Image (cartoon, helix red, strand yellow):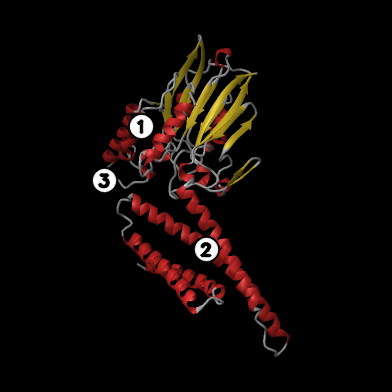
Amino acid sequence: MARLIITLVLVLLIDIYVFQAIRTVTAGLAPSGRKAVYIIYWAVSLFTLGTLLLALLTRGSAPNPVRMQVANVLFILFISKLVVVLFLFIDDLVRLTQWLSNAMRGPEKPQFNVSRHKFMSQLALIMGAIPLGTLIWGMVKGAYSYQVKRVTLRFPNLPPAFDGFRLLQITDMHSGSFHSSKPLEEAVALINKQAADVVVFTGDIVNNVASEVEPYVPILSRIKAPSGVYSILGNHDYGDYVQWASREAKTRNLDTLKQHHRNAGWDLLLNEHRVLERNGQRIGLLGVENWSTRMNFPRYGSLSRAYAGTEQLPFKILLSHDPSHWDGEVNTRFQDIDLMLSGHTHGMQFGVNIPGFKWSPVQYVYKQWAGLYQKGRQYLYVNVGLGFLGYHGRVGFLPEITVFEFKRT
């Protein structure tokens, strides 16, 4: 209860602080105009407080689409107000410093610069409007703006029969975050349009439980490729973030999830490998369960098991959900794995992603977090994902379908 009260008081204080900027900026309006702005601001703020209180009191109940959308709107409003507070606080800190400095000089009354204060209030509100508009765009448009990225990789050891071989990667679908089947149907149509030789999915088909993906299995079963569709599990697929009634219930959930992969026609690789053959020549496709160097994520993978039997294959591709696996084990112990494909980071679903420059807060957590990386003769590619989790949108790092074309040098 104490934590609940502290949270609500903190949010209310932020609302009051931001309201000071509203008052300053609207001081020149007619009384009726100011009154309308005040009513709108406090109506939204009180709705936010009431919804937050309801969410905190009922946080154990299952989420639904409306609940999740409201939570995202509250998150966007909170982030935007924090930006406003940051600029207001800087202004207040400067004014306090000036006031103390003037007070120490003599008995004259310190002067308050009204025009500068109004300018800083306007600037604070403008800066707060930037994340507000950007994050709302990310929900309305960015979440389903599927991007096809094309990557050409050249290898001296690629068997000649696989020169021009095309592999398509998708990852992090997080089906529990979808509100309808239409966006996924569009994504599947776009995937099939690429006419790749093989399709791979690198984990996190659900948010938490197997039932989330069940309605979408018929849609996913439409994904076709001549050399097959292969998949692995990600950290969210194991049900580790759910309080289960028993260990048996958790096991049944994972077994059901695995069956959904099979029902979709996907070949789920559980620390094992497959051999892809073309004109009598072969390459290896290895798939491991989740393996991370970070202690807050599970480690179920065994690359040794997946690797066994592929030693003589001239070319190997590894599917491993968490990109930290690359530095953690792959490029130190398994240096004949040519390419590792990962997901997991989502590019944090927010950042700047323009030609020649990319930035996201997730880069302070993961060394490899989006795009192509190379160490020696080995490559890692981190796909930022097809779906979304938490924030129901994407800004900068839009949902990704990656098509690789392999060339022999």
Q: Quadrant of residue 245?
A: top left
Disc 1 packing (10 Å; few <14; some 14–19; many ≥20):
some
Q: Is residue 272 left or right of residue 361?
A: left
Where is 311 relative to 183, above or below? above
Q: Which residue is mark 2?
A: 82
Amino acid type, mark 3: Ala
Query: Where is the C terminus found, in terms of image quarters?
Result: top right
Amino acid type, mark 1: Ile
Query: Where is the N terminus found, in terms of image quarters?
Result: bottom left
In the image, which disc is placed on residue 245?
Answer: 3
Q: Residue furthest top?
A: 280
- Camera-side residue of 312 and 363: 363
Name which of mark 3 and mark 1 comes first in the sequence.
1
Q: Position of residue 59 (x, y in %)?
A: 33, 57
Q: Position of residue 205 (x, y in %)?
A: 39, 37
Q: Residue furthest bottom?
A: 107
Residue 337 appears anywhere in the view:
no
Q: What is the spatial separation of the Cα atoms under label 3 and label 2, in whole angstroms?
A: 39 Å
Q: What is the spatial separation of the Cα atoms under label 1 and label 2, in whole angstroms?
A: 41 Å
Which mark is in front, 3 or 2? 2
Amino acid type, mark 2: Leu
Name which of mark 1 and mark 2 comes first in the sequence.
2
For the point 50% across and 13% down, which residue is it?
A: 278
Residue 144 appears anywhere in the view:
yes
Do the residues bearing badges 1 and 2 touch, measured as CB atoms within 8 Å?
no
For the point 50% across and 59% down, which residue is it?
A: 79
Total marks placed: 3
In the image, which disc is placed on residue 219?
Answer: 1
